[in-house]
Amino acid sequence: MTHVPPGTRVLGSATVVADDPGEHARNKPSFYADPAAWLVAETVDRALEDCAEHVRDDADGTAILVVSATGSERTMRRIADSVPRSRVSPLRFAGANPGVLAGLPALRHGLRGPSLLLAGHPDAAAPVAGTVIAGWLRDGHARHVLLVDLHATEGERETCCCLVLTGAGADR
């Protein structure tokens, strides 16, 4: 994660690099989420482990903002490729929605703060992410924000970084 928005402090962080995001998937026959969403969820889990208990237990006051130019592209490509050969499960459509990148970690941790996916390269989206985060913290919509950056690196490898942020004067 290269951009910490002005006026925020980092309380915890984690980075997970995956040659295949599917290594982190926990799909079941009745529940499917894009492998990239499971990679994001794993990274969020690790970042929250790095935080004080009051942050991990603040579901009402924690927001999540994911920035990714690739999102669930790999899964959407696989679904499109399978259409001519067979029927596609409706679970695959729901689980391939790019919003699942923010939704799955929010569901796993019971987060009830705002959630948002910015579809764009993290460097280009940084000013927008900073503005959104500052607004959430300033206006009391969140006390903590999980800022996640998911991007492709060499080949099919994906890197996911998560920062747990709070306002500059909070949580001291």
Image (cartoon, helix red, strand yellow):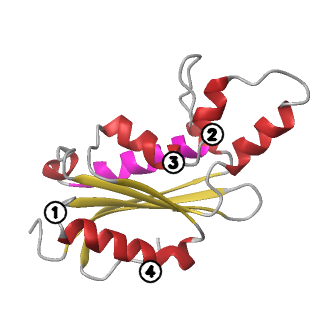
Mark before the other along the chain sequence, 3 or 1:
3
Q: What separation in Å lies between label 2 and label 3 (alpha carbons)? A: 9 Å
Question: Badge 3 is on which residue?
Answer: 101
Assess whether mark 3 and mark 4 are in contact (beta carbons under 8 angstroms).
no
Q: Amino acid at mark 1?
A: Gly
Q: What separation in Å lies between label 4 and label 1 (alpha carbons)? A: 20 Å
* Majority SS type along the magenta span: helix
Mark before the other along the chain sequence, 1 or 2:
2
Q: Which mark is residue 150?
A: none
Q: Is residue 99 left or right of residue 79?
A: left
Q: SS for tag 1?
A: loop
Q: SS for tag 2?
A: helix
Q: Amino acid at mark 2?
A: Ala
Q: Quadrant of residue 121?
A: bottom right
How far across and down, in percent of the image, does residue 44 sit? Answer: 39, 50
Q: Which mark is residue 140?
A: 1
Q: Amino acid at mark 3?
A: Leu
Vertical relation: 77 (above or below) 161: above
How far across and down, in percent of the image, does residue 86 sit? Answer: 85, 22
Magenta stretch containing residue 38, yes or no?
yes
Vertical relation: 6 (above or below) 152: below
Q: What separation in Å lies between label 2 and label 4 (alpha carbons)? A: 27 Å
